[in-house]
Amino acid sequence: MSYFSDILSKVTSNQKNTQCPICHKFARQDAHKVAKGLAMLCPHCHALFVKP
Ligand SMILES: [Zn+2]
């Protein structure tokens, strides 16, 4: 019965704790977006930002 925990671990491992440069709060973002330099949406201040 490890199906659900497998999915859960995959989802969480694909997310990266990223700090918003506007409000400086941390939020989990898609690791692929971080790696590709795509714009991310901050859930706290709703700003779009790109990690350098
Ligand atoms: Zn923010």
Image (cartoon, helix red, strand yellow):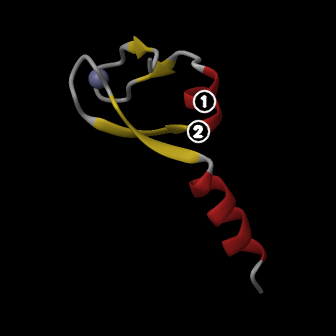
The residue at 68%/59% (across/down) is: 10
> Would you call the spot at circle 2 few (<14 residues within 10 Å), some (14-19), or many (20 or more)?
some
In the rendered view, tell whether residue 36 sits above or below residue 9: above
Specify the quadrant that holds the N terminus.
bottom right
In the rendered view, tell whether residue 47 sits above or below residue 9: above
Does mark 2 have its CB less than 8 Å from ligand 1?
no
Q: In this view, does 11 lie to the left or right of 51?
A: right
Q: According to the image, label 1 marks what residue? A: 35
Q: Evaluate if marks 1 and 2 touch, with contact meaning CB atoms under 8 Å apart.
A: yes
> Would you call the spot at circle 1 few (<14 residues within 10 Å), some (14-19), or many (20 or more)?
few
The residue at 22%/28% (across/down) is: 24
Nearest to the eye among marks 1 and 2: give it.
1
Q: Distance between the residues labelled 1 and 2?
A: 6 Å
Q: Is residue 28 left or right of residue 31?
A: left
Q: What residue type is labelled 2?
A: Ala
Does mark 1 have its CB less than 8 Å from ligand 1?
no
Residue sitting at the far left: 23
Image quadrant, ligand 1: top left
The residue at 28%/20% (across/down) is: 21
In the rendered view, tell whether residue 3 sits above or below residue 17: below
Q: Where is residue 4 in the image (x, y as percent from the top left)?
A: 72, 72
Q: Where is residue 46 in the image (x, y as percent from the top left)?
A: 36, 18
Q: What element carries label 2?
A: helix
Residue 48, which numbered label? none
Q: Which of 43 and 24 is in front in this view?
A: 24
Q: What residue type is labelled 1?
A: Ala
Q: In this view, does 27 lie to the left or right of 32?
A: left
Specify the quadrant that holds the C terminus.
top left
Q: According to the image, label 2 marks what residue? A: 31
Q: Where is residue 50 in the image (x, y as percent from the top left)?
A: 46, 15
Q: Where is residue 35 in the image (x, y as percent from the top left)?
A: 60, 30
The residue at 25%/16% (across/down) is: 22
